[in-house]
Amino acid sequence: MVAPRTCDGCGADSVGNEVIRAVALRVADLKARGGACQAYGAVLEGSLAGKRIVVRPFMWRVGGSLASAQASSTGEIDVARDVDPLNIGRRSLDEVVHSVEHEAVHIAFAIPSGAEWNEMLVNERVDGCRSRSSVVGATP
């Protein structure tokens, strides 16, 4: 069996202009939506402004699954840029931004990571704020 490649100790890359622009656009959209969207958008904005969003070169393994991002309560967000070489493909820019948003929700609402129910709750909030049919100001 091939040991999974981990990246807990990998050097971080600076967040590129493309990611900065994409996150800034999401922040503007989240602010316009108000409610819970605006609440986690503020965390996202603070993390971006404070240069606390870090892009790692590859995914790392957490238990039996692949993590796309990790966050700390102080606003640091580590995001995986590429898929682990044991898997296929590269992550799109939108997938990276989605991961950053997901972790901002964890921070904004103090939802612990890991438990499947918590992850589903966070994804529902992110997906609700990304939906074109979302009502501005509605709390997903």
Image (cartoon, grey):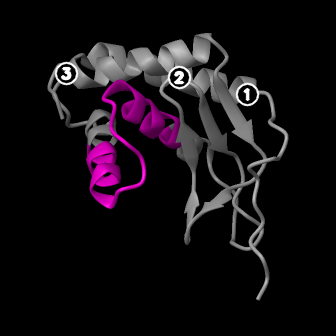
Query: In terms of sequence position, does the residue under pointer 1 or pointer 2 come before the other?
Result: 1
Q: Is 107 a magenta residue? A: yes
Counting other residues with Cα less than 10 Å from the Cα at mark 1, is it few (<14), some (14-19), or many (20 or more)? some
| Residue located at (81% from left, 47% from top) | 9
Kind of residue at badge 3: Val
Question: In the rendered structure, which segment of residues is drawn in magenta?
Answer: 98-124
Residue 98 percent location from the top left of the image: 48, 41
Q: Does residue 46 sit above or below 101 in this rendering?
A: above
Mark carried by residue 75? 2
Query: In terms of sequence position, does the residue under pointer 3 or pointer 1 come before the other?
Result: 1
Q: Does residue 74 sit above or below 71 in this rendering?
A: above
| Residue located at (53% from left, 31% from top) | 72
| Residue located at (69% from left, 31% from top) | 54
Task: Give the Cα separation between the discs numbered 1 and 2.
Answer: 15 Å
Kind of residue at badge 2: Gly
Q: In the image, 58: left or right of 20?
A: right
Nearest-to-viewer mark from 2 and 3: 2
Mark carried by residue 136? 3
Query: Dot 2 lies on which element?
Result: loop
Quarter of the figure with the N terminus: bottom right
Q: In the image, 44: left or right of 38?
A: right
Q: Which residue is mark 1?
A: 15
Q: Is 39 a magenta residue? A: no
